[in-house]
Image (cartoon, helix red, strand yellow):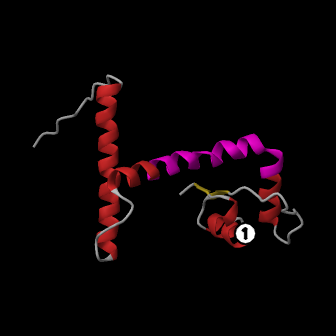
Amino acid sequence: MREVSADKGYISQKNLQATVDHGAQPFIPFKVNTQPDRDSDLWSKMFFYYNYKRDEFLAHYHKRSNVESVFQMIKSKFGERLRSKNETAHINEALTKVLAHNLCVVIQSIYELNVTPEFCMEAA
């Protein structure tokens, strides 16, 4: 994990610190009424980065839009709910939906964009 993007509802000292503690850079926009005078160097650093390097910040933050689009595509094609009973099965079911989505995108690209796939053959 290198970056964490979240909407304004997640801006808090605790979330910023947890992200940094896990080795990632937080990209969480500040609310309009947010003040820079917190007791935290991290809060101040991110506040000034957000306000004075806004274009750079938003370039990272808007990657989140792509993720949200993919989630929406998966939910609309395969349903919003996981039907399995336990946590391991939930994880496997979610990963299967992601794999199926990726296969659908590859197949769509083959036909709509005239992409010719190259499959490598491994020796048995």
**Location of mark 1 (residue):** 12
Q: Is residue 3 above or below residue 62?
A: below
In terms of image quadrants, where is residue 23?
bottom right
Tell me if residue 66 is in the magenta stretch.
yes
Q: Position of residue 83 (x, y in %)?
A: 30, 69
Choose between 8 and 44: the one closer to the eye: 8
Residue 17 position, x and y percent, is: 69, 69
Q: Main secondary structure of the magenta part?
A: helix
Q: Residue furthest bottom?
A: 86
The residue shown at (79%, 51%) is 49
Looking at the picture, which amino acid does disc 1 mark? Answer: Ser
Magenta highlight range: 50-71
User: Is residue 120 left or right of 91 when viewed as pictured?
Assistant: left
Of the 4 image quadrants, the one containing the C terminus is: top left
Q: Residue at x 79, y 44 (%)?
A: 53
| Image-based side of 119 in relation to 54, left or right | left
Nearest the eye: 115 or 39 = 115
Q: Quadrant of residue 44?
A: bottom right
Q: Could you tell me which residue is drawn at 32 percent across and 36 percent down?
A: 106
